[in-house]
Image (cartoon, rainbow, N blue to C red):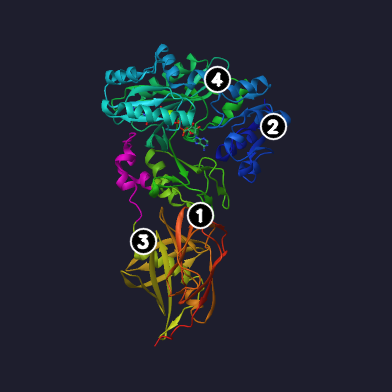
Amino acid sequence: MLAKILIANRGEIACRIIRSARALGIASVAVYSEADANAQHVRLADEAVAIGAAAAAESYLRADKIIAAALSCGADAIHPGYGFLSENAAFARDCSAAGLIFIGPPASAIEAMGSKSAAKRLMADAGVPLVPGYHGENQDDTLLAAEATRIGYPVLIKAVMGGGGKGMRVVESGAEFAAALASCRREAQAAFGNDVVLLEKYLQRPRHIEIQLFADSHGHAVYLFERDCSAQRRHQKVIEEAPAPNLAAATRRAMGEAACAAARAVGYVGAGTVEFIVEPDGRFYFMEMNTRLQVEHPVTEMITGQDLVAWQIRVAAGEALPLAQDDIPLSGHAFEARIYAEDPDKGFLPATGTLTHLRLPQGSARVRLDSGVIEGDTISPWYDPMIAKLIVWGETRDIALQSLRHALAQCEIAGVACNTAFLARLAAHPDFAAGSVDTGLIARAEAELLPGATAPASWQLALLSLAEALDGGKGWRLNGTLRRHFDWQVAGQLHRVSVDYLADGFTVTTASACAHARASLDQGELTLWLDGQRHQARVIRHGHSRTLFSGSERLLAQLADPYAYASAETQGHAHLRAPMPGRVLAHLSNTGSHVTQGTPLLILEAMKMEHTLRAPADGVVKAYLFHPGEQVSDGDELVDFETMPQAQPA
Ligand code: ADP
Ligand code: ADP
Ligand code: MG
């Protein structure tokens, strides 16, 4: 057995591998870049070695440094995780040459499957069905165009070295072919350093179903059933599940056997995934083989009760597969939702920033969280913006789906944009619930899944404001009643809310409504009764930012000018501070200007959003303390502002 393993990866997958190694009594070594010195995988591992600068090309992709680190700490083996060097045949070879075990397939198998077109030629010989297409070496433009016509439009152009949904173009007609080919080649060259392409018939409404397989060095190969990864956005997986819904047992067996045939054809050893594209009538075709552990492997672990990383380690140590085909259990149903720092309302733009608040559901036999971050960690621009994988299991698909929805509603992530509300809407979509999934589902349902930023509802503004009111703030005495105003900035719009304190609750006034409200706050859980309806939420504060979590939806708001009413009472200096770390974008007034309360003074860009800071009262802009372009920290004073005495209310 192995005694020490170095993990050539980061994030959730590094943490996940360390845990399995530990369970087997194996010591773990983390490697880390400058950006990851405090990362969870570094804290979790028994040892950690710095390997270079933040850019992956300087650290996690540096085979030489990683191998040197493994040798220096006496590791027996290297686990590459997924991404980075996991499908790099030269790295696998260098490990062996250095006397280290590469926990993955032989370099020759990685090479054989590395090019989608070479893999297809091999598969054709092994009798595995292929999508009609062209995967030849001749890359002449005219020949490719003629092949596209022969295949029949629509046609898909794919980079043969592609991955992660990149380097693909759907072409609807011959007129578009030349331009699509050129653009696909450019993208492929930039992303994979190779612009060779193949052509495939573009299938309508197919499913993506993949087989998890395992082979050992004693000639055994088994399949651990399938995963359905049809819920995709731009060819990238969003929610995966196992087993595939509505799949005939005979199809499952045929696909499993085809995957094992594919593995045998390349002398495969270890964990691998054969991806198939499946037509509505059940015909299936080989798409590609991923010669590594897949991001979505946990759904397979949940339905089989096996630890695939433990299998990988044991196979790499030379053991035979722990189970024969007929002994592999299949029980219940599992889903995985990928929680990313990205903004669905801004075209899924990756987001960066500090996870100022992170509350994920409690793990149990049914709910599993694979994450590489904790509250306070940063999602940096250097790597994949994944926050966590949420995996659930249930006796049936319906039970598992219910559990997925429930778990998504419990996720609270603040400080960084994230996709949990989008995932929850997908999990609740009737087609998804019915298991009638295909790769076009998300695109067709876009209007429902991405309703876009809407103006906040009165009850949301009331919740935000009452959270402040109940937090011990004092009422503002005006004409005999206690009243406080709150100016909320939501998606660039200012919303004023007035709260009158009454003996039996509050009167909440917004631009569109005025109603009596009752509210209570219990350990951060806020309950509001408004117009005969009960609303429940949690409000998380950070500086002047508030994140309102209700159900699986979240609302981001800024308390626009919290000093306005305190400082307007007396003449003096008001402190306009940065509500969060960010960058000053623009000054909107001039030094020395006399301005009225509410006049925009400065734009701050923080967490990918623009925030306008306004005059807290009538007064004079004495000085701007940062120039446009400068970075500021949370709480930095941005404007020196002198307030003027106000006329007393009559
Ligand atoms: P596929 O089956 O299409 O490869 P995956 O989601 O498993 O889908 O991975 C997509 C690609 O992106 C793979 O090459 C994978 O290694 C890479 N990848 C995905 N997530 C990460 C991550 N967090 N870090 C590094 N690479 C990643
Ligand atoms: P990658 O290496 O980026 O994972 P794949 O070849 O696995 O590339 O394809 C990614 C996704 O693109 C598939 O999961 C599927 O949704 C879609 N796709 C691939 N080939 C076809 C096809 N011939 N017809 C329709 N959709 C396809
Ligand atoms: Mg793929």
Sequence-wise, which precedes: disc 3 or disc 2?
2
Q: CA distance from mark 3 to mark 4?
A: 55 Å
Query: Which residues, given as a range, are shown in magenta?
Result: 424-453
The x, y position of residue 315, in whole percent, is: 59, 23
Q: Which residue is mark 4?
A: 269
Q: Nearer the viewer, mark 3 or mark 4?
A: 3
The x, y position of residue 335, in whole percent, is: 43, 39
Sequence-wise, which precedes: disc 3 or disc 4?
4
Q: Which residue is mark 2?
A: 69
Q: Is residue 513 visible?
A: yes
In the structure shown, which secondary structural element does the residue marked by tag 1 occupy? loop
Sequence-wise, which precedes: disc 4 or disc 1?
4
Q: CA distance from mark 1 to mark 2?
A: 35 Å
- Residue behind label 1 places its C-beta within 8 angstroms of ligand 1: no
Q: Is residue 437 magenta?
A: yes
Q: CA distance from mark 1 to mark 3?
A: 19 Å
Sequence-wise, which precedes: disc 1 or disc 3?
1
What is the three-letter code of the residue carrying label 2?
A: Ala
Residue toward you, 385 or 222: 385
Q: Which residue is mark 3?
A: 456
Q: Quadrant of residue 108?
A: top right
- Residue behind label 3 places its C-beta within 8 angstroms of ligand 1: no
Q: Quadrant of ligand 2?
A: top left
Q: Which residue is mark 1?
A: 415
Q: In the rendered view, would you say 236 is above or below 638?
A: above
Name the quarter where the C terminus is drawn. Answer: bottom left
The x, y position of residue 73, in whole percent, is: 72, 32
Q: Residue at x 51, y 50 (%)?
A: 360
Asked whether disc 3 touches disc 4, contact meaning CB atoms under 8 Å apart, the reply is no
Relative to 22, 628 lies left or right: left
Q: Residues within 10 Å of mark 1 (few under 14, many from 20)?
A: many
